[in-house]
Amino acid sequence: MIPLRDTIPSKTFPIVNVTIIVVNIIIFGFEFLMPESELTKFIFTYGFIPLNATQEGGLNNLFPLFTSMFLHGSWMHLFSNMLALFIFGDNIEDTMGHQGYLTFYVLGGVVAGLSHYWFSPLSAIPVVGASGAISAVLGAYLILFPHSKILTLIPLFVIFYTVEIPAAVYLIFWFVSQLFNGTMALTSDVASGGVAWWAHVGGFIAGFVLVWVFIVPLNYGYEDN
């Protein structure tokens, strides 16, 4: 299922959300122009590698947890992440305010990275991508806008259908799929396809919980008389 848009328009221009998207695109442009050897070094320097943290005796260097959020492994990886952020992020920024949303986004991404570390402390594979932080945005969206509708593209063989799905249904289905794939990756010898499933799960739960800290009451369902 590919989300195309939601049914709740932004009340304000989502400057932080748009800036995050632009920064991700610019950084990927630099990645695309790098020679392969330089790109590999770049990814291993700024991607988050759990084994490095384990060998260093703990998470003393949190810098890669931040920088890894702005790196992507392919055009499709970048496009799918930025599409989801474009659809869901503006409404969360509306509710939290610009500064609150930026803090929430970064913190959600860090918690997502730590979740991946918890389940794969010996992994030597760099983790890159905004998926963990975006998962936190999805978790917050489920709390704040469960009755929104998500226009979704559903491919069926060679035919494509579009249907409006309630946000709660769409997001719960997405979360369960991530949880299922993460569990299968833990219990199977088969590779998980290079996806940090538990970063998605941890990010979503972080967003689901942290949203209560960041929401502004006057913007959430009522006003003073």
Image (tube, grey):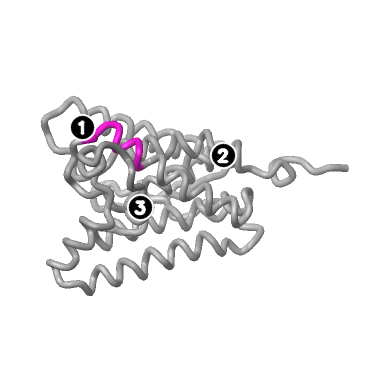
Residue at left offset 50%, top offset 51%: 88
Q: Which residue is mark 2?
A: 211
**Amino acid type at image mark 1:** Ala
Q: Residues within 10 Å of mark 3 (few under 14, many from 20)?
A: some
Residue at left offset 56%, top offset 39%: 211
Q: Residues within 10 Å of mark 2 (few under 14, many from 20)?
A: many
Residue at left offset 56%, top offset 64%: 15
Q: Which residue is mark 1?
A: 185
Q: Is residue 150 above or below residue 187?
A: below
**Amino acid type at image mark 3:** Phe
The circle drawn on residue 57 is: none
The circle drawn on residue 63 is: 3
Q: Position of residue 52 (x, y in %)?
A: 22, 44
Q: Position of residue 200 (x, y in %)?
A: 36, 40
Q: Is residue 44 left or right of residue 20?
A: left
- Quarter of the figure that contains the C terminus: top right
Q: Are marks 3 and 2 in contact (CB under 8 Å)?
A: no
Q: Toward which corner of the image does residue 115 lie, by quadrant?
A: top left
Q: Position of residue 4 (x, y in %)?
A: 44, 55
What secondary structure predominates along the stretch shown in magenta?
Answer: helix
Residue at left offset 63%, top offset 53%: 97
Point out the stretch of residues depicted in magenta: 113-121
SS class of the residue under badge 1? helix
